[in-house]
Amino acid sequence: MERKSFRFVGLMSAALIVLLAGIGAAATFSPALVVDTYMDASEEDETFAEAETLWAASESGEPVRIAFLVYSEMVKLAMEIESGELRAYVTEVGRPGEVTLYFYDMAVLETETWRDMPRYDEEPLATLNIQETGWATWDATALVKKAAEECSEGCPFTVVLVAEGDASIGFASMEGSSDRKAVIEYVA
């Protein structure tokens, strides 16, 4: 009788552990990309929200084209986020080099231009050296945690892509390809 009771308790304990592990298991979340655009210093009054390619370019270390990716609100608190990544499809490499992620705590509008460009955070959150076309993936853990902290009340947020040095990189926009548009995923 004791053996059966001991086995039953053991099985129940194992089932409870599996149940609790399932409850605490991490899930992947992906805020929706709602706007993507870029701004160009040489065409400071033009908008590029309808462009099929988003450009991040710099010359002599100064940005001349900056890409902006606007995402819907975060659904998790910063302390719940384990990791995050940004994937963007590189369609063209004019000049290979580094592209750095920055954060802006509001949505960039489709109508904004270089002349009225918003002031995004100066703190770089991740940098990736891009040499060829295809999917580029940044570790965006710091970015999604910052978005969760800054936009806890449901506001959209913007990822800012800035080329370093003399890089010139073109990314697929949501107008160009729904399969290749930029995606943020985070685990919480």
Image: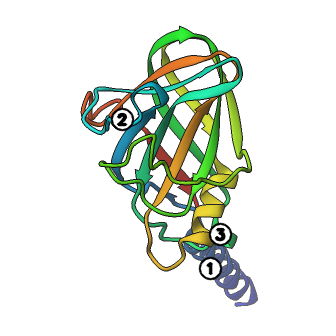
Q: Residue at x 75, y 89 (%)?
A: 2
Question: Distance of mark 3 from mark 2, alpha carbons?
Answer: 25 Å
Residue 141: x and y in percent read 67, 52
* Secondary element type, mark 3: helix
Residue that mark 3 sits on:
78
Residue 99: x and y in percent read 63, 29
8 versus 108 height, above or below = below
Q: Residue at x 72, y 45 (%)?
A: 124
Q: Which mark is residue 85?
A: none
Residue 119: x and y in percent read 58, 54
Q: Residue at x 68, y 80 (%)?
A: 13
Contact? badges 1 and 3 (CB < 8 Å): no
139 versus 42 height, above or below = below
User: What is the crowding at mark 2: few (fewer than 14 residues within 10 Å), some, or many (at least 20)?
Assistant: some
Left or right of 130? Residue 32 is left
Amino acid under disc 1: Leu
Report the front residue among 31 and 126.
126
Q: Which mark is residue 181?
A: 2
68 versus 32 height, above or below = above
Q: Which of the 4 image quadrants contains residue 150?
A: bottom right
Report the front residue among 74 and 69.
69
Residue 57: x and y in percent read 55, 23
Mark closer to the chain start, 2 or 1:
1
Question: Distance of mark 1 from mark 3, alpha carbons?
Answer: 28 Å
Question: Distance of mark 2 from mark 1, alpha carbons?
Answer: 42 Å
User: What is the crowding at mark 1: few (fewer than 14 residues within 10 Å), some, or many (at least 20)?
Assistant: few
Mark closer to the chain start, 3 or 2:
3
Amino acid under disc 2: Lys
Residue that mark 1 sits on:
16
Amino acid under disc 3: Ala
Report the front residue among 165 and 85.
165
